[in-house]
Image: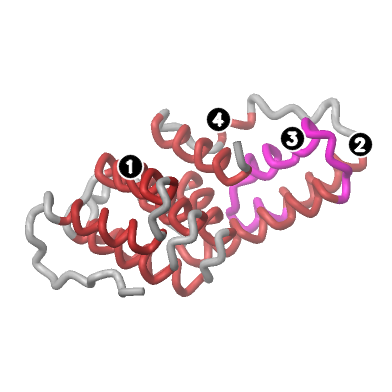
Amino acid sequence: MSTRSRLTMVVLGLTLAAASARAQSASVSTAQWPAALRERVDRIADSAKVQRIPTEPLYAKAAEGVLKGADEARIVQAVTRLAQDLRDARAALGPSATDAELVAGASVIHSGMDVPALRKFFSTREARPQSESFVMPLVVLSDLLARRVTQDVATASLSNLLERGAKDAELTSLRRDIERDISGGQSPDVAARMRTDAALATLPAANRGIRRPPSA
């Protein structure tokens, strides 16, 4: 399983269990880490905490590196990169974003989306009830980008679905179907456009105009 897939599973696990990233901290023990590594990760985490960035994913990232036998420099580099991605996600998603949304947003940033583009996509949150998390749309966006669906097509597809009231179940199905089509040899953008059109056909008409995903 790839690093991105593991991160996706972590985010989905947080959502399905209705737990915050704090739940991971109990399983991440630093007692057996080299003292120098622990101190460096602690410094990164302390800085993140001041900026209201969740620290548990940082320790989880370091623990993954230790488990794999990576050297200290590579572990610190990975943790530092994740901390920056989380900061960028905070800048894009704002102060009200949950820890799980930030982790999912960091994955989108890691996929290559910049802060303004992610902020614009996050504005479609207004189409969802306030009680609903925005984790799944972010997870699906990250996955589509990882599968080489272009940014414009991925964001237009998901924005249209969200504006039409698509729920997490529809987004999960979309993600699965696009993955299957791509694995079968379909162009990522073509797969995304076709599956989005099919999903839109099952949803109620929107009050606003639909932005068709751009053609190749």
Up/down of 200 relative to 4, above or below: below
Mark 3, Cα crowd under 10 Å, few <14 / some 14-19 / many 20+, is some
Task: Give the left or right position of residue 104, taking residue 72 as reference.
Answer: left
Q: Are marks 2 and 4 in contact (CB under 8 Å)?
A: no
Left or right, 95 with respect to 49, comes to left
**Disc 4 residue crowd, few under 14, some 14–19, many 20+, Cα 10 Å:** few
Outermost front residue: 185
Of badges 2 and 1, the one in the foreground is: 1
Locate residue 164, reporting x and y percent.
Answer: 17, 58
Q: Which residue is mark 1?
A: 172
Q: Identify the residue at image location x=77%, y=39%.
A: 65
Chain-order first, disc 3 or disc 1: 3
Q: Which mark is residue 23?
A: 4
Residue that carries the numbered disc 3 in the rendered image: 63
In this view, the residue in front, 120 or 197, is: 197
Q: Choose between 158 and 125: the one closer to the eye.
A: 158
Q: Tell me the distance, in whole angstroms, between the alpha carbons under discs 3 and 4.
A: 15 Å
Residue sitting at 55 percent across and 55 percent down? 106
Q: Is residue 70 magenta?
A: yes
Q: CA distance from mark 3 to mark 1?
A: 29 Å
Q: Which residues are magenta?
A: 47-73
Please say which color scheme the image uses. secondary structure
In the image shown, does 175 or 60 lie closer to the viewer?
A: 175
Amino acid under disc 4:
Ala
Circles 3 and 1, Cβ within 8 Å, touching? The answer is no
Element on which disc 3 rests: helix
